[in-house]
Image (cartoon, grey):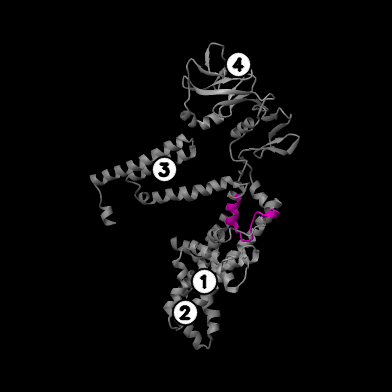
Amino acid sequence: MNRLSGFTGTIALLGKIIFMAAIDAILLAMFFAALHKHSGIIQLVIALVALAANYVYFSKRTMPFKFLLPGLILLILFVVIPVVYTVEMSFFNYQSGNIITKDAAVTQLINNGLTPDAANTSYDMVLGTDNGGFTALLTNPATHISYIANEKTVVVLNPGEFKTNAKGDAVSVSGFKAYTPDEEANLDSVISTAKFPLPNGNFIQPQDTSSASLLTQSVQYDSASGLLKNLATGRTYKDNGNGNFANVNNPKDVLYPGWKSFSKFQNYAHLLSDPNIRGPFIGVFVWTFCFASITVILMFGFGLLLAIALEQKLRFKRFYRSIVILPYAIPSFMSILIWKGMFNTQFGAVNALFHSHIDFFDSPWLARGMVLIVNLWLGLPYFYLISTGALQAIPADLEEAAEMDGATSTQILRQIKLPLLLQILAPLLISSFAFNFNNFNLIYLLTGGGPTDALHGQTAGATDILITYTYKTAFNGANQNYGSASAISMLIFLIVASLSLWSLRRSRVLDLVN
């Protein structure tokens, strides 16, 4: 540190300029990439980071921030912004079918309203460019009328203005250059979305690289009134305030796709009011508390018993201690997968040992017991270590004084050691509860949250905890509900944050800082 603080002068300044130039170059590249994607918020964040970095590292009055700025930036980017974004999303109807903007939804609904005309009119087509613009030569094989079309107009070609092939289709006209097969292969996205408008409101749309069809517009949108009308059925739809167009005569008849819309506290209300959400949510909520509580009690109980037992005079004590902490030497995800294989119905070691064919993954209570056993295996070394340390931290004078007063070993443990242990380990027990409250890896890798009775419409499994239920709500299944998942995430955040704050206050860490 002394050498670093003494690194000043021209060489240090030059090094700082080179370093900041590299940082600015990276941020500038990121800024233009965001600009190209029209990501205004990301552009603003990058600009603020660049301004803050240059001000802090080129100013002589910001010495503390030279060390704090990288950590603050990472904290804001990876903690604060995701939390703010999650809070925002929890107030929106944001799910499958309601993801895009309203303008994009209207465009898709109008495009979905394009249907072939009654005569199924089709055209032979040659694609190319006319003065650099995307253009098509179209010929109606029934009428032998040819057209030159772009995404603005469709113009009839007079005989003699164009060249034809053996079938009589237009293949060339002045200023038109046909695409080669290789060029057409690189224009899939352009061809699939191209539409050539006709004066009557209909369109000619390419079906592939050599043919097109006449499509009629059966859906019209009036931006002034905000009404969407289906000309084929005569139905009129309006914005229902929840991100969809709904039939004015039947509100349950809604159109998809919809759009992401502000829904206030609807996602939170649905957790308790919607029977399809309330039932699974309450069940998962209760099991999550039971799982975290039982796990901590078992880990602490067995860890303390092991610590007391191995405090006695035993042969091969070091060997026993090595065996106890062995699970720490193996990555947890590997241990979970090994246990999953051991509980396999057909080939698992547990069934092979007892000559049985128990399906641990299909029974709710067996699956829950299996989860608790595996989690006990994973957490036991930690609780053994902290219990051993806490026992050694208790003054020996207390035990000696109690023995002189005639207290038995059981009385000393129950009335002296255990209260002191709970006082010492309370913050760690609370943090362990918070960790297991969000123990995603164990549940997801071991049982996947199952078993789940999908045939009866269950969305949550018997071993799902809130975090895995949130994951399923957001990413699994046909209906991915990001808004409800964000609302559940906020409840988890409030619970864990409250436990953490209580732990900090109980351990008086904040008092020491002040």
Q: Amino acid at mark 2?
A: Leu
- How crowded is the residue under tag 4: few (<14 C-alpha within 10 Å), some, or many (20+)? some
- Does the residue at mark 2 contact the one at mark 3 (Cβ under 8 Å)? no
> Is residue 456 something that shows in the picture?
yes
The residue tagged 1 is 423
Instruction: Please state the extent of the stretch shown in magenta in the rendering.
Output: 454-473
Specify which label sits upstream in the sequence, 2 or 3.
3
- Does the residue at mark 2 contact the one at mark 4 (Cβ under 8 Å)? no
| The stretch drawn in magenta includes residue 466 | yes
Label 1 to label 3, Cα distance in Å? Answer: 44 Å
Q: Amino acid at mark 3?
A: Val
**Quarter in which the C terminus is drawn:** bottom left
Residue 40 in percent (x, y) is at: 49, 37
The residue tagged 4 is 145
Q: How many marks?
A: 4
> Of helix, strand and loop, which one carries label 2?
loop
Quadrant location of residue 32? top left
> Is residue 505 something that shows in the picture?
no
Q: Which mark is residue 310?
A: 2
Q: Which mark is residue 49?
A: 3
Viewer-side label of 1, 2: 2
Residue 397 higher or lower than 302, as above or below: below
